[in-house]
Image (cartoon, rainbow, N blue to C red):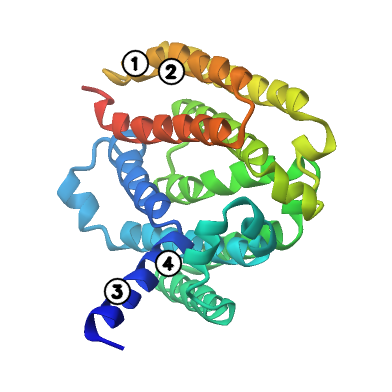
Amino acid sequence: MSLSDSNQRSLLKILSLFSLVRGYNIIVLVLAQYLTARYILAPQTAWIALLLDFKFFAIVSASALTTAAGYIINNFYDAAKDQINRPKKYILEHLISQQLQLIFYLLLNMAAFVIASAISIKVVLFFLFYMMTIWFYSSTVKRLFWLSNVFSALLMILPFWAITLYFKNFDPIIFYHAAYLFFLILARDIIKDLENFKGDWVQRYQTLPVVFNHRTTKIFITVAILCTFIPTYFLIQQPLGNIHYFFWASIPFLSFVLIFLWRAQTEKAYLWTHNFIKLWILIGVLSIALIYH
C-alpha cells in the first residue's frame, strides 16, 4: 500500500468518526451552550470570565462527550435500518468496526464521567442519568410508537438543563426558549421518520409513518410546528433586543416549511424539509448573540 493510499484511508476513518459522533451537531451544541450561558443564563458575566470558568467548561465538555457517545450507541442499534435508508453513510461510518465503535462509546462516557467527578457528585449523578437515558432510548424506546420522538427531543435539550442548574437561573424566558426548541426538534425528529420510512418499516420500528400513514404524520408535524408559535408569542413580548427579528421571522419561515412539507412526497423532499429546520435551529443559536443588543 502506498503512502498516499494510507493517508487517504486515515482521512476516511477520521471522516467516519466525525460522522459517527455527528461532529457538526456537537460543535453546534457547544456553541449553543456558551451563547446561552453568556446572553441568557448569566448576561452579567463577561466573556473572559465565562471562558475561564473551569466548572462550566467541564459541564459543557461532559455534555459534548456524552452526546457524542450517544450518537455512537444510537448508530450501533440503528445499523440495520441505516443500511437501507442511508447506504453511503452506512459504508462511511462502518469503516470503523462495530467493536471499535463500542470501545469509543465506553471511552467517551468514561471521559465524561471523570470530568463530571471533578465538579461534584450531583454533576456525576446528572450525567450518569443522561448516559443511561440515552442508552435506554437507543436500545428500547426508539422502537416504540410516538414516545421515541418526545424522548429524542427531551434528550436534545437536557444538556441545556445542566447549565441552567449550574447558573441557578429559572427565569420564565428560559422556559419559553426551551419550549420553542423542544417543539422545533420534535417536528424535525418526526420528519426524519418520514425520511427513514423504508428502513423503519422493514425493521418494524413503530414510528408515526409506520403506525399511521404519511398524511397523519404530517398533521402531527404541523401541530408541533404550530406549537412553536406559542412560546414565540411570549418571547416577542419580552425586552430581548434584536433577537425579536429571529422570532418574528420564524413565523413566515416555518409556515413556508409547512407548505413545503405538505407538498413533499419523496425521501429527498423530506430530507430538504429536515434540513430547513436544521438550518433554522443553527440560525437561532447564532441569534442568541442578538439578545439585549
The quadrant in which residue 286 appears is top left
Which kind of residue does numbered mark 2 sit on? Ser
Q: How far apart are marks 1 and 4 (CA)?
A: 39 Å
User: Disc 2 designates what residue?
Assistant: 250
Relative depth, front residue between 124 and 209: 209
Crowding at mark 4 (Cα within 10 Å: few <14, some 14-19, many 20+): many
User: Disc 3 designates what residue?
Assistant: 8
Q: Distance between the residues labelled 4 and 3?
A: 12 Å
Which kind of residue does numbered mark 3 sit on? Gln
Which kind of residue does numbered mark 1 sit on? His
Question: Marks 4 and 3: which is nearer the front?
Answer: 3
User: Disc 1 designates what residue?
Assistant: 244
**How far from the left and from the top, in percent, is residue 15?**
37, 65
- Mark 1 and mark 4 lie on one chain; the one further toward the N terminus is 4
SS for dot 1 = helix
User: Disc 4 designates what residue?
Assistant: 16
Residue at x 45% of width, y 70% of height:
112
**How far from the left and from the top, in percent, is residue 198?**
71, 45
Residue at x 38% of width, y 14% of height:
249
Which kind of residue does numbered mark 4 sit on? Ser
Q: Which residue lies furthest to the front in this view?
A: 1
Question: Marks 2 and 4: which is nearer the front?
Answer: 4
Tag 4 near tag 3, CB within 8 Å: no
